[in-house]
Amino acid sequence: MQNLYLVIVGDDWADEFQQTVETPVEVSEDAPDFVEGSRRARFWGAAEGKGGTKRAHFDEMAEGDGIIFHDNNVVFGMGKAGEKYDPETEGPAVGGWLWNNPDSNLVFEVLDYVSDLSISIEQVWRDLGFEESYNQMYSFKKISDDSIDSIQDSYESLSEFYSDLTDGDKTDQPETLDADPVSRKAAYYWVNQSNNPEEIENGFLKAPLDNSPHHDVRKLEKGDLVFNYRDGELIACSEVTTPPYVVTDTDGKKHQRAGIEVTHFEEPLRLSEIFEYLMRDEVKLDKYYPLNPAGINQQYLFNLSEKAGQYILEEAQMPGSNTDRLEKRLSLPEFDIELPDGLYFYGGEETRLRQQIHAALQAGKHIIFTGPPGTGKSRLAKAVAEQAEELDSVDGYTFTTATAEWSSFDTIGGYVPSDGGDELRFDPRLFLRCFRDHNGTVQNRWLVVDELNRANIDKALGPLFSVLSKDSVELPYERKGRIRVDWVEEDTDLSEIAADDDRFPVTPAWRLIGTMNTFDKTSLYDLSFAFMRRFSFIHVGVPDLTDDEEVIEHNLLDPSAGPNYGTVWQRSNPHLEDVIDQHHQEVMVLWAQINEYRSLGPAIILDIFEQLAAFEGGDRRSPLTSAVLNYVFPQLEGLRQSDQESLLKELAEDGEIKADSGSESVELPLDISYLRQKANDMFDLDLDQISTE
C-alpha cells in the first residue's frame, strides 16, 4: 500500500454509494464492452471538476492503495483500489452506465470492502496530522506526504494504520438482501411497533420476507430516518445504521431486518396533536401512508412525505429538522480557494486574486468580479461556488445570467395561477429558492449571477437591499401568512422562522457572487451606490502587452518563454500545441494592437487560436482574417468611429515585437480589403482610404 485516499460520500450521493459499493454490481450485458463481465464488482468514482487536483490524485492511484469512505463526521467504510478506468475514454462511459452521470469520469473498482464501520473522523484527522476541525472539501483526495509522516510516527506503515482502522469489524457478514424493493421509496418512514416493543429496545426493524409493500424493509438505506409509533404516540426517530439483510428464524422462516439507532423524543407526540396537519392534502401521500380519515392504518411500514417528516422533526425538536439545518448553516468556515485549472494569471496576480477572494468571504462580503470580456470572471465565480458547496453549511449554488428584462417577479417571485387554475398562489423565484426548496426544507444555496449589471438592479433586487445589509424585510405577498425574508444569526430565535414555510432565512454563510463586463457601460445599467456598498469588487484585468517604449511583449504567448498563457493552453488543449508554436507572434501583435482601443481578455485570444486550428481552405490570410471577423469585430461595437478607423489602419501595418536582440517586425496575415468591406457593413464606416498593401 503506497498511498491512502480520502473519499467523501455526501447525502446527495448516498443512494448511488449504496447501489454500487455497499451492494456489488452485477456486470451484465448493458455494461460498456471494456468492463470485464460475468462477475459482481464494486465501483466508485468522482467528477474530475475544473481544478485538476482530483485528476492528479486519481492518476497517482495504484491497485492496492487504501480508501477511506467518510461523510466528514464518521468513517463508515474502507476498501482498496482495484482497476481504474481511463478518465478520457472509459470513465465517462462507466459513469453513465452506473450513475447516469458521464461527468463522474474518475472511476475505480473497490476491493476488499469493509462496511458498517463507525469511526470518529476526529480520530482519523489526528492520525493524519489534521486539526480536529478540518473539513475536507474535495470529494476525492490523496493524503499528503506530511500526513504519511504523521501516520508513521505511530505506525510502521500505511498498511498497519489501515488494518488498525478496520480491526474489530465483523468477519461473518449476514446474508445480503439483494431483492429489489416492491414499493416506492420515500423521504421519511413510519413504523408501527405497538406489538414489537423489543425492536425499539434492541435497535432493529424486522418484517417477513415477502412481497407486501408494508413489509418492504429492503427499500431502506443506511441513513434513512424512521419514526417509531407505539400506542397512540410517536415516541422516537430512528436512523437506519445497517443495510437490510436476511435472518432466518429457528422455524426456518426468513425475515428482512435492518439495524437502527433509536433517539427517543423528550416528549412523545400524541397522534391527536399531529393528525390534522399530517392529513392535509399538500402533506399526505396517495399510497403507503400511515393515516386515513378514521385514524391509523394497522400495517407495519409506511411512507411519509418530505413535509410530513420535516413537520414531525420540528414538533419533536430533533436533529435533521429545519431548525437543526438552520443552526448548521449559520457560519461559513474558513477554506482555501483554488483558481480553476486552465486559467493563467500573470505576474503574481493569481496570489493576489486568491487573497482578495479569501478576505472578502471571511469578511462576510458578497463578491462582484469586474473586468474586460474574456478575463475568466465567470469561471472564477463558478469555481468559488463549486468549492464552497463542499462545505456542510452550503447546499450547492445556482448559476444564472442577468437580463435587462429582470424584475422582482424573476428574482423574488409573484402570484401565478394555482394548479387548478381557480385561484392565484405565491411562487418563490430565483432569490428565495436559495433559502427553501420546493418542499419548504431550509437550505443555503449560493447565487452566481453572470453579467449582473445588465439588469436594472433597483428594479430587480431593490426589495432585498435590506437583507444584503443584514436586516429582515417583509414582502408584499401572502401564502398562509405574510412572506418574509429574515436575516438570522446565532442569537436569532430560529425555531419559529424554521417552522414557517413563508419565512425565508438568510444566514451569514450565504453569498451572492456576480460578474460585470466593464467595457460597455453605455448599454448597461449603472449600479447604485446603495447596491455597491454591499459588495467587494475584485478586478480581473489584462496584463500590459507592451513595454515602456511601446514594443510588444513576446513572453505572454511564446511557449519557449513560459510559464505563460501559451504553455497553459497547450497543456489544457493538446490539439493547439502546433498552432500556438507557429502563430504566437502574429496573435500577440494582434492582441496588443486591439487592446490599444478595446481591452480584451485572454479567453478571446484562446478562441482565436481555436479558430486558426480548425480553419480549412483559403489563402494564408484567410484563417486570421476569419478569426478577427468572428471574435474581434463583435467586441468593437460601441467603440468611437475614429477609434474603429484607427484600429483597422493599424492592423494593416507591421507590429514591433520583442526579440532576443532588440525587436523584430511582424506582419499580420490579414485580408485588409475584406476587413474594410465588413467594417463598412457592420459599423457604417467609410474606410476606402485604408491601404490594402
Image (cartoon, grey):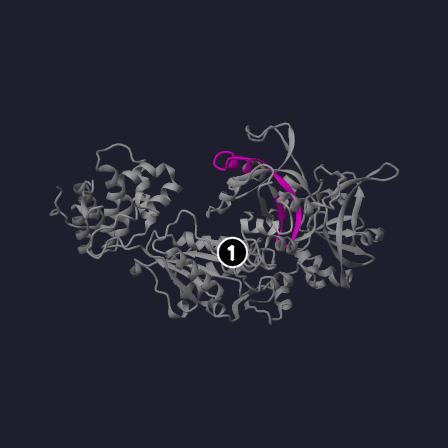
Residue behind mark 1:
388
User: Residue 44 falls in which quadrant of the image?
Assistant: top right
| Residue at left offset 56%, top offset 64% | 331
Q: Residue furthest right?
A: 251
For label 1, the crowd category at 10 Å Cα-Cα, with few meaning under 14, some 14 to 19 and many 20 or more, is: many
Who is closer to the viewer here, 325 or 36? 36
Q: Amino acid at mark 1?
A: Ala
State whether residue 529 is above or below residue 615. Answer: below
Who is closer to the viewer here, 49 or 679? 49
Residue 476 image position (x, y, % from top left): 51, 68
Q: Which residues are magenta?
A: 67-95
User: Residue 517 falls in which quadrant of the image?
Assistant: bottom left
Who is closer to the viewer here, 270 or 35? 35
For the N terminus, the image quarter is top right
75 in magenta: yes
| Residue at left offset 70%, top offset 38% | 180
Residue 110 image position (x, y, % from top left): 62, 38
Residue 567 image position (x, y, % from top left): 35, 44
User: Does residue 127 appear to the left or right of 211 in the view shown?
Assistant: left
Residue 404 image position (x, y, % from top left): 38, 58
**Dot 1: what SS?**
helix
User: Does residue 141 appear to the left or right of 351 in the view shown?
Assistant: right
599 in magenta: no
